Image (cartoon, rainbow, N blue to C red):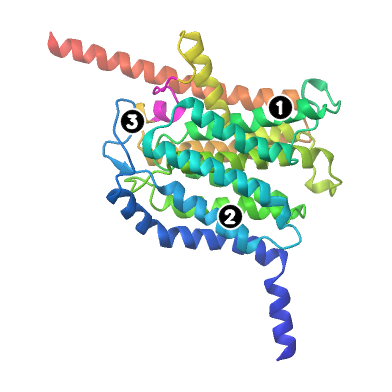
Protein backbone atom coordinates (compact mmCIF):
# COMPACT_ATOMS: atom_id res chain seq x y z
CA UNK A 1 0.00 0.00 0.00
CA UNK A 2 2.83 2.37 0.90
CA UNK A 3 4.52 1.61 -2.43
CA UNK A 4 1.29 2.39 -4.29
CA UNK A 5 0.88 5.73 -2.51
CA UNK A 6 4.46 6.70 -3.27
CA UNK A 7 4.00 5.71 -6.91
CA UNK A 8 0.85 7.80 -7.33
CA UNK A 9 2.49 10.70 -5.49
CA UNK A 10 5.41 10.63 -7.90
CA UNK A 11 3.06 10.25 -10.87
CA UNK A 12 1.00 13.26 -9.79
CA UNK A 13 4.13 15.38 -9.63
CA UNK A 14 5.57 14.22 -12.94
CA UNK A 15 6.10 16.56 -15.89
CA UNK A 16 3.85 14.39 -18.06
CA UNK A 17 0.86 14.70 -15.71
CA UNK A 18 1.49 18.43 -15.23
CA UNK A 19 1.55 18.91 -19.00
CA UNK A 20 -1.69 16.96 -19.50
CA UNK A 21 -3.60 18.50 -16.60
CA UNK A 22 -2.53 22.03 -17.50
CA UNK A 23 -4.58 21.49 -20.68
CA UNK A 24 -7.49 19.45 -19.32
CA UNK A 25 -8.11 21.51 -16.17
CA UNK A 26 -8.86 24.86 -17.87
CA UNK A 27 -10.73 23.04 -20.65
CA UNK A 28 -13.12 21.50 -18.11
CA UNK A 29 -13.29 24.70 -16.10
CA UNK A 30 -14.26 26.89 -19.07
CA UNK A 31 -16.80 24.37 -20.36
CA UNK A 32 -18.41 24.30 -16.92
CA UNK A 33 -18.53 27.98 -16.02
CA UNK A 34 -19.07 29.58 -19.46
CA UNK A 35 -22.90 29.18 -19.48
CA UNK A 36 -23.19 31.09 -16.18
CA UNK A 37 -20.84 33.82 -17.41
CA UNK A 38 -22.81 34.12 -20.67
CA UNK A 39 -26.05 34.46 -18.72
CA UNK A 40 -24.55 37.23 -16.59
CA UNK A 41 -23.28 38.92 -19.76
CA UNK A 42 -26.82 38.98 -21.15
CA UNK A 43 -28.28 40.29 -17.89
CA UNK A 44 -25.67 43.04 -17.54
CA UNK A 45 -25.75 43.87 -21.27
CA UNK A 46 -22.04 43.16 -21.81
CA UNK A 47 -22.67 42.57 -25.48
CA UNK A 48 -21.33 43.21 -28.97
CA UNK A 49 -23.73 45.17 -31.12
CA UNK A 50 -24.28 44.80 -34.86
CA UNK A 51 -22.61 47.34 -37.16
CA UNK A 52 -22.13 47.48 -40.93
CA UNK A 53 -18.83 45.59 -40.91
CA UNK A 54 -20.03 42.94 -38.44
CA UNK A 55 -20.11 39.31 -39.52
CA UNK A 56 -22.77 38.49 -36.91
CA UNK A 57 -26.43 39.45 -37.28
CA UNK A 58 -27.54 39.39 -33.63
CA UNK A 59 -26.45 41.16 -30.45
CA UNK A 60 -24.15 38.67 -28.70
CA UNK A 61 -22.50 38.63 -25.24
CA UNK A 62 -18.75 39.30 -25.40
CA UNK A 63 -17.77 37.68 -22.11
CA UNK A 64 -15.82 34.66 -23.36
CA UNK A 65 -12.60 36.40 -22.35
CA UNK A 66 -13.63 36.23 -18.69
CA UNK A 67 -13.87 32.44 -18.81
CA UNK A 68 -10.65 32.15 -20.85
CA UNK A 69 -8.65 34.32 -18.45
CA UNK A 70 -9.98 32.58 -15.34
CA UNK A 71 -9.08 29.22 -16.87
CA UNK A 72 -5.55 30.35 -17.72
CA UNK A 73 -4.84 31.92 -14.33
CA UNK A 74 -6.33 29.07 -12.30
CA UNK A 75 -4.35 26.47 -14.24
CA UNK A 76 -1.11 28.45 -13.89
CA UNK A 77 -1.61 28.79 -10.12
CA UNK A 78 -2.46 25.13 -9.59
CA UNK A 79 -0.28 23.35 -12.15
CA UNK A 80 2.99 25.31 -12.27
CA UNK A 81 5.59 23.47 -10.15
CA UNK A 82 6.72 25.53 -7.15
CA UNK A 83 10.36 25.53 -8.27
CA UNK A 84 9.52 27.35 -11.54
CA UNK A 85 6.40 29.33 -10.60
CA UNK A 86 8.52 32.47 -10.22
CA UNK A 87 9.13 32.44 -13.98
CA UNK A 88 5.45 33.23 -14.57
CA UNK A 89 4.68 35.78 -11.85
CA UNK A 90 5.37 38.84 -13.99
CA UNK A 91 3.59 37.31 -16.98
CA UNK A 92 0.57 36.67 -14.74
CA UNK A 93 0.62 40.32 -13.62
CA UNK A 94 0.72 41.45 -17.26
CA UNK A 95 -2.19 39.13 -18.10
CA UNK A 96 -4.28 40.74 -15.35
CA UNK A 97 -3.51 44.23 -16.68
CA UNK A 98 -4.50 43.51 -20.30
CA UNK A 99 -7.56 41.63 -19.09
CA UNK A 100 -8.75 44.67 -17.16
CA UNK A 101 -8.04 46.94 -20.14
CA UNK A 102 -9.92 44.60 -22.48
CA UNK A 103 -12.82 44.17 -20.08
CA UNK A 104 -13.21 47.93 -19.64
CA UNK A 105 -13.16 48.29 -23.44
CA UNK A 106 -15.88 45.64 -23.75
CA UNK A 107 -17.95 47.59 -21.22
CA UNK A 108 -17.64 51.12 -22.57
CA UNK A 109 -15.30 51.35 -25.61
CA UNK A 110 -12.06 52.85 -24.32
CA UNK A 111 -10.20 55.30 -26.52
CA UNK A 112 -7.25 53.97 -28.48
CA UNK A 113 -4.83 55.88 -26.27
CA UNK A 114 -6.12 54.25 -23.08
CA UNK A 115 -5.94 50.79 -24.65
CA UNK A 116 -2.42 51.43 -25.93
CA UNK A 117 -1.30 52.73 -22.53
CA UNK A 118 -2.61 49.59 -20.79
CA UNK A 119 -0.94 47.28 -23.31
CA UNK A 120 2.37 49.14 -23.10
CA UNK A 121 2.30 48.94 -19.29
CA UNK A 122 1.68 45.19 -19.42
CA UNK A 123 4.31 44.36 -22.01
CA UNK A 124 6.81 46.68 -20.28
CA UNK A 125 6.57 44.46 -17.21
CA UNK A 126 7.37 41.27 -19.10
CA UNK A 127 10.18 42.65 -21.27
CA UNK A 128 11.91 44.51 -18.44
CA UNK A 129 11.76 41.35 -16.32
CA UNK A 130 13.47 39.28 -19.01
CA UNK A 131 11.15 38.23 -21.86
CA UNK A 132 13.35 39.70 -24.57
CA UNK A 133 14.86 39.26 -27.99
CA UNK A 134 18.62 39.60 -27.55
CA UNK A 135 19.63 39.57 -31.22
CA UNK A 136 18.30 39.45 -34.79
CA UNK A 137 19.07 35.69 -34.70
CA UNK A 138 20.25 35.68 -38.31
CA UNK A 139 17.55 37.98 -39.68
CA UNK A 140 19.18 40.33 -42.22
CA UNK A 141 22.25 38.13 -41.62
CA UNK A 142 22.84 39.88 -38.31
CA UNK A 143 23.83 38.06 -35.12
CA UNK A 144 25.20 40.85 -32.91
CA UNK A 145 23.85 41.13 -29.39
CA UNK A 146 21.50 44.02 -28.74
CA UNK A 147 22.05 46.77 -26.23
CA UNK A 148 19.58 46.20 -23.36
CA UNK A 149 17.56 49.34 -24.17
CA UNK A 150 17.18 48.37 -27.84
CA UNK A 151 16.35 44.80 -26.81
CA UNK A 152 13.51 46.08 -24.60
CA UNK A 153 12.14 48.34 -27.34
CA UNK A 154 12.23 45.69 -30.08
CA UNK A 155 10.80 42.98 -27.82
CA UNK A 156 8.01 45.27 -26.67
CA UNK A 157 7.17 46.23 -30.25
CA UNK A 158 7.14 42.56 -31.32
CA UNK A 159 4.75 41.57 -28.54
CA UNK A 160 2.56 44.62 -29.25
CA UNK A 161 2.25 43.63 -32.92
CA UNK A 162 1.28 40.07 -32.00
CA UNK A 163 -1.25 41.24 -29.38
CA UNK A 164 -3.03 43.54 -31.82
CA UNK A 165 -2.67 41.12 -34.73
CA UNK A 166 -4.50 38.46 -32.74
CA UNK A 167 -7.10 41.00 -31.67
CA UNK A 168 -7.79 41.83 -35.32
CA UNK A 169 -8.51 38.25 -36.43
CA UNK A 170 -11.30 37.89 -33.87
CA UNK A 171 -13.85 38.74 -36.53
CA UNK A 172 -15.75 35.52 -37.26
CA UNK A 173 -16.95 32.66 -35.10
CA UNK A 174 -14.25 30.19 -34.10
CA UNK A 175 -11.28 31.78 -35.89
CA UNK A 176 -9.40 33.35 -32.98
CA UNK A 177 -9.97 30.25 -30.87
CA UNK A 178 -8.75 27.93 -33.61
CA UNK A 179 -5.65 29.95 -34.50
CA UNK A 180 -4.83 30.54 -30.83
CA UNK A 181 -5.18 26.84 -29.98
CA UNK A 182 -2.94 25.79 -32.88
CA UNK A 183 -0.26 28.32 -31.90
CA UNK A 184 -0.38 27.54 -28.18
CA UNK A 185 -0.21 23.78 -28.77
CA UNK A 186 2.73 24.26 -31.16
CA UNK A 187 4.66 26.32 -28.63
CA UNK A 188 3.49 24.27 -25.65
CA UNK A 189 4.58 20.90 -27.00
CA UNK A 190 8.00 22.27 -27.98
CA UNK A 191 8.58 23.88 -24.58
CA UNK A 192 7.54 20.62 -22.91
CA UNK A 193 9.95 18.42 -24.86
CA UNK A 194 12.76 20.93 -24.26
CA UNK A 195 12.10 20.84 -20.48
CA UNK A 196 10.71 24.35 -20.08
CA UNK A 197 7.77 23.33 -17.94
CA UNK A 198 6.72 26.84 -16.87
CA UNK A 199 6.15 28.08 -20.42
CA UNK A 200 4.63 24.74 -21.39
CA UNK A 201 2.03 25.16 -18.61
CA UNK A 202 1.32 28.72 -19.79
CA UNK A 203 0.83 27.59 -23.40
CA UNK A 204 -1.28 24.52 -22.66
CA UNK A 205 -3.41 26.38 -20.10
CA UNK A 206 -4.24 28.90 -22.80
CA UNK A 207 -4.92 26.17 -25.37
CA UNK A 208 -7.25 24.33 -23.00
CA UNK A 209 -9.13 27.52 -22.12
CA UNK A 210 -9.52 28.39 -25.81
CA UNK A 211 -10.79 24.94 -26.72
CA UNK A 212 -13.39 25.13 -23.94
CA UNK A 213 -14.43 28.59 -25.12
CA UNK A 214 -14.84 27.39 -28.71
CA UNK A 215 -17.71 25.16 -27.60
CA UNK A 216 -19.72 28.38 -27.17
CA UNK A 217 -18.22 30.39 -30.03
CA UNK A 218 -18.80 28.10 -33.00
CA UNK A 219 -21.67 29.08 -35.27
CA UNK A 220 -24.21 30.03 -34.02
CA UNK A 221 -22.06 31.74 -31.38
CA UNK A 222 -23.40 32.10 -27.85
CA UNK A 223 -20.53 34.43 -26.90
CA UNK A 224 -17.49 36.24 -28.28
CA UNK A 225 -14.19 36.46 -26.44
CA UNK A 226 -14.18 40.26 -26.60
CA UNK A 227 -11.08 42.35 -26.07
CA UNK A 228 -10.75 40.90 -22.57
CA UNK A 229 -9.97 37.55 -24.20
CA UNK A 230 -8.20 38.53 -27.41
CA UNK A 231 -5.73 40.85 -25.64
CA UNK A 232 -4.91 38.20 -23.03
CA UNK A 233 -4.38 35.44 -25.59
CA UNK A 234 -2.42 37.84 -27.82
CA UNK A 235 -0.14 38.71 -24.90
CA UNK A 236 0.43 35.04 -24.11
CA UNK A 237 1.27 34.34 -27.77
CA UNK A 238 3.63 37.32 -27.86
CA UNK A 239 5.49 36.10 -24.78
CA UNK A 240 5.66 32.52 -26.12
CA UNK A 241 6.91 33.75 -29.52
CA UNK A 242 9.72 35.85 -28.05
CA UNK A 243 10.76 33.07 -25.65
CA UNK A 244 10.61 30.48 -28.44
CA UNK A 245 12.86 32.47 -30.76
CA UNK A 246 15.40 33.23 -28.02
CA UNK A 247 15.43 29.73 -26.52
CA UNK A 248 15.52 27.89 -29.85
CA UNK A 249 18.39 30.11 -30.99
CA UNK A 250 20.59 30.15 -27.88
CA UNK A 251 19.82 27.21 -25.58
CA UNK A 252 21.79 23.97 -25.64
CA UNK A 253 19.23 21.57 -27.04
CA UNK A 254 19.21 18.03 -28.36
CA UNK A 255 19.78 18.13 -32.12
CA UNK A 256 16.36 16.74 -33.03
CA UNK A 257 14.63 19.53 -31.08
CA UNK A 258 16.71 22.31 -32.61
CA UNK A 259 15.56 24.57 -35.42
CA UNK A 260 17.90 26.08 -37.98
CA UNK A 261 15.59 29.06 -38.48
CA UNK A 262 13.52 29.70 -35.33
CA UNK A 263 12.39 33.10 -36.60
CA UNK A 264 10.81 31.52 -39.70
CA UNK A 265 9.17 28.77 -37.63
CA UNK A 266 7.64 31.41 -35.35
CA UNK A 267 6.33 33.37 -38.35
CA UNK A 268 4.77 30.16 -39.69
CA UNK A 269 3.04 29.44 -36.37
CA UNK A 270 1.59 32.97 -36.25
CA UNK A 271 1.16 33.44 -40.00
CA UNK A 272 -2.59 34.13 -39.89
CA UNK A 273 -2.58 37.13 -37.51
CA UNK A 274 0.82 38.46 -38.63
CA UNK A 275 0.14 38.39 -42.37
CA UNK A 276 -3.43 39.63 -42.06
CA UNK A 277 -2.33 42.60 -39.95
CA UNK A 278 0.49 43.51 -42.33
CA UNK A 279 -1.75 43.15 -45.41
CA UNK A 280 -4.69 45.14 -44.01
CA UNK A 281 -2.52 47.95 -42.64
CA UNK A 282 -0.66 48.19 -45.96
CA UNK A 283 -3.90 48.37 -47.99
CA UNK A 284 -5.33 51.06 -45.72
CA UNK A 285 -2.18 53.18 -45.94
CA UNK A 286 -2.06 52.81 -49.74
CA UNK A 287 -5.66 54.04 -49.87
CA UNK A 288 -4.77 57.05 -47.72
CA UNK A 289 -6.72 55.75 -44.71
CA UNK A 290 -5.70 55.37 -41.09
CA UNK A 291 -4.24 51.88 -40.47
CA UNK A 292 -6.49 51.67 -37.39
CA UNK A 293 -9.71 52.32 -39.32
CA UNK A 294 -11.93 49.24 -39.07
CA UNK A 295 -13.23 47.67 -42.29
CA UNK A 296 -14.01 44.31 -43.94
CA UNK A 297 -10.68 43.81 -45.70
CA UNK A 298 -9.46 41.07 -43.36
CA UNK A 299 -8.89 37.70 -44.98
CA UNK A 300 -11.65 36.08 -42.90
CA UNK A 301 -14.11 38.72 -44.16
CA UNK A 302 -12.99 38.04 -47.74
CA UNK A 303 -13.69 34.33 -47.28
CA UNK A 304 -17.13 34.97 -45.81
CA UNK A 305 -17.93 37.48 -48.57
CA UNK A 306 -16.84 34.83 -51.09
CA UNK A 307 -19.68 32.64 -49.86
CA UNK A 308 -18.13 30.54 -47.09
CA UNK A 309 -19.84 30.11 -43.75
CA UNK A 310 -18.00 31.08 -40.58
CA UNK A 311 -17.23 27.42 -39.90
CA UNK A 312 -15.92 26.86 -43.43
CA UNK A 313 -13.76 30.00 -43.35
CA UNK A 314 -12.37 29.10 -39.91
CA UNK A 315 -11.65 25.53 -41.03
CA UNK A 316 -9.90 26.75 -44.19
CA UNK A 317 -7.66 29.18 -42.28
CA UNK A 318 -6.95 26.63 -39.55
CA UNK A 319 -5.92 23.99 -42.08
CA UNK A 320 -3.81 26.57 -43.92
CA UNK A 321 -2.09 27.48 -40.64
CA UNK A 322 -1.27 23.81 -40.00
CA UNK A 323 -0.04 23.38 -43.58
CA UNK A 324 2.32 26.36 -43.33
CA UNK A 325 3.68 25.12 -39.98
CA UNK A 326 4.30 21.67 -41.48
CA UNK A 327 5.94 23.18 -44.56
CA UNK A 328 8.23 25.38 -42.46
CA UNK A 329 9.15 22.44 -40.21
CA UNK A 330 10.02 20.29 -43.23
CA UNK A 331 12.02 23.00 -45.05
CA UNK A 332 13.76 24.39 -41.94
CA UNK A 333 16.95 22.30 -42.20
CA UNK A 334 17.09 22.69 -45.98
CA UNK A 335 16.78 26.43 -46.62
CA UNK A 336 18.29 29.76 -45.64
CA UNK A 337 16.21 31.81 -43.17
CA UNK A 338 15.32 34.52 -45.67
CA UNK A 339 14.41 32.09 -48.44
CA UNK A 340 12.18 30.16 -46.05
CA UNK A 341 10.42 33.35 -44.93
CA UNK A 342 10.04 34.34 -48.61
CA UNK A 343 8.32 31.03 -49.37
CA UNK A 344 5.97 31.34 -46.36
CA UNK A 345 5.02 34.92 -47.16
CA UNK A 346 4.93 34.32 -50.93
CA UNK A 347 2.53 31.39 -50.70
CA UNK A 348 0.32 33.29 -48.26
CA UNK A 349 0.30 36.40 -50.45
CA UNK A 350 -0.62 34.39 -53.53
CA UNK A 351 -3.56 32.71 -51.84
CA UNK A 352 -4.74 35.97 -50.26
CA UNK A 353 -4.58 37.72 -53.65
CA UNK A 354 -6.53 34.91 -55.31
CA UNK A 355 -9.28 35.23 -52.68
CA UNK A 356 -9.40 39.01 -53.17
CA UNK A 357 -9.64 38.71 -56.97
CA UNK A 358 -12.37 36.09 -56.68
CA UNK A 359 -14.35 38.44 -54.43
CA UNK A 360 -13.87 41.28 -56.88
CA UNK A 361 -15.17 39.15 -59.77
CA UNK A 362 -18.14 38.01 -57.70
CA UNK A 363 -18.96 41.60 -56.76
CA UNK A 364 -18.76 42.69 -60.41
CA UNK A 365 -21.04 39.81 -61.43
CA UNK A 366 -23.60 40.73 -58.75
CA UNK A 367 -23.57 44.37 -59.85
CA UNK A 368 -24.08 43.35 -63.51
CA UNK A 369 -27.01 41.08 -62.57
CA UNK A 370 -28.56 43.86 -60.51
CA UNK A 371 -28.31 46.30 -63.45
CA UNK A 372 -29.81 43.75 -65.82
CA UNK A 373 -32.73 43.15 -63.46
CA UNK A 374 -33.41 46.90 -63.23
CA UNK A 375 -33.30 47.15 -67.02
Q: Secondary structure at mark 1?
A: helix
Marks 2 and 3, Cα distance to the nearest angstrom?
30 Å
Bounds of the magenta segment: 293-303
Quadrant of image for the N terminus: bottom right
Horizontal and vertical percent position of residue 300: 43, 31
Task: Kindly tell me whether residue 50 is visible in this rendering.
Answer: yes
> What residue did someone put label 2 on?
205
Can you give x and y, in whole percent of width and height, for residue 50 in the image?
29, 33
Q: Residue at x 66, y 35 (%)?
A: 124
| Sequence-first tag of 2 and 3 | 3
Relative to 192, is 143 on the left or the right? right
The residue indicated by pointer 3 is 54
**Left or right: 11, with 257 as reference point:** left
- In the rendered image, which residue does mark 1 sit on? 154
Q: Is residue 73 magenta?
A: no
Tell me the residue at 78%/42% (across/down). Answer: 247
Amino acid sequence: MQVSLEYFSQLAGSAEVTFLLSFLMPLTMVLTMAPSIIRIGVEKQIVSGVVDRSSHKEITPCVGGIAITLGILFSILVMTPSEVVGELQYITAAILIVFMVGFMDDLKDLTASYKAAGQILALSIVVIMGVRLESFYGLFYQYWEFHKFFSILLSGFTILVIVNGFNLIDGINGLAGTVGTIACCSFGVWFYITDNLALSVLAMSTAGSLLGYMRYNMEPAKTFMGDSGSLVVGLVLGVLAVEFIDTASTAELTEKYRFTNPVAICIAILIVPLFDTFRVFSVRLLRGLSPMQADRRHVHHLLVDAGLTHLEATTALGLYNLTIISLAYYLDPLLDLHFLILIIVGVTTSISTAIYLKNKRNKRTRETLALNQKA
